[in-house]
Image (cartoon, helix red, strand yellow):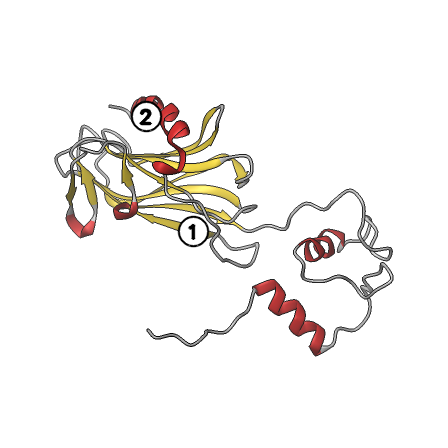
Amino acid sequence: MKATQWIASIGGLVGLVVLCGASRLSGQESRPGFGVDSASAEVINAWDMQTTYDLAQWQLGLNGYRYLVFGTLISGVHVPNGAKITTIVIEGCDDSAVGGVVFGLYRSTSAGTDILATADTGSPSTPGCSVFAADLTVPETADYDAYRYWIAGGNQTGDGMTTVGAVHVLYQLQVSPPPGTPTFNDVPTSDPAFQFVEALVDSGITAGCGNGNFCPDAPLTRRQMAVFLARALGLHWPVSSVF
């Protein structure tokens, strides 16, 4: 069965997943990460995925990979809210001439579900064990207020010739778009740092220097730097524990 046909066959599960919500999908949450230039990845191990059927039979493959005798693997996605999702990557093995490994990345609301990207090992190719990537046609800015994100797929053969190690969801952090009106009198919308200053304000990192100003050209003291960094990174220290 071709990867596109197999993914399409998951369509019957879409309504079920939308209705069942968190009872069938892993909870979604933000993961810490910093910087906007490098790609980060949420790695969803095959052993952390759920099956779509209570009676689905899973088996241990080579290298600690997993495969199902029948059924589909499914998991929620946990990239940080506001991050730009760019790519889905399968870590899997395909030694079958009649099937492969395929996963789709989905975006759901109560009204329906969209497929954002599909990655597969190729069928009837037998490329062996590797990573297989697919870029989203349009990068998706994660918006958990409007959508839920999840992956579904697995191995197409139940003989151990196609196995799953993990699915990687690649993303980049990004600075939020600026508002239409400025917060500070001295940082107008035309200021090249306007977007970044507004991001600091909206994140609670700074409240400016007083009197409705930010004082963008004023020197920064070590005391102020400490406040900025501690607030931005959420710095804390461990408490005493019995463990």
Cα distance in 3D space between marks 1 and 2: 25 Å
Q: Quadrant of residue 105?
A: top left
Q: Nearer the viewer, residue 21 or 129?
A: 21
Q: Residues within 10 Å of mark 1 (few under 14, many from 20)?
A: some
Q: Nearer the viewer, residue 28 or 219?
A: 28
Element under disc 1: strand
- Quarter holding the N terminus is top left
How many numbered markers are drawn?
A: 2
- Quarter holding the C terminus is bottom left
Q: Which numbered disc covers residue 41?
A: 1
**Does 109 sit left or right of 68 as displayed?**
right
Q: Closer to the N terminus: mark 1 or mark 2? A: 2
**Spot occupied by residue 17 in the image (x, y as percentages of width and height):** 37, 30
Q: Residues within 10 Å of mark 2 (few under 14, many from 20)?
A: some
The kind of residue on which mark 1 rests is Ala
Element under disc 2: loop
Residue occupying the point 33% across, 26% down: 7
Residue occupying the point 18% across, 52% down: 63
Residue occupying the point 56% across, 65% down: 234
**Does 17 sit left or right of 218 as displayed?**
left
**Spot occupied by residue 147 in the image (x, y as percentages of width and height):** 51, 35
**Does 189 sit left or right of 65 as displayed?**
right
Residue occupying the point 55% across, 51% down: 173
The kind of residue on which mark 2 rests is Ile
Q: Is residue 238 above or below residue 11?
A: below
Q: Which numbered disc covers residue 10?
A: 2
Q: Is residue 149 above or below residue 40?
A: above
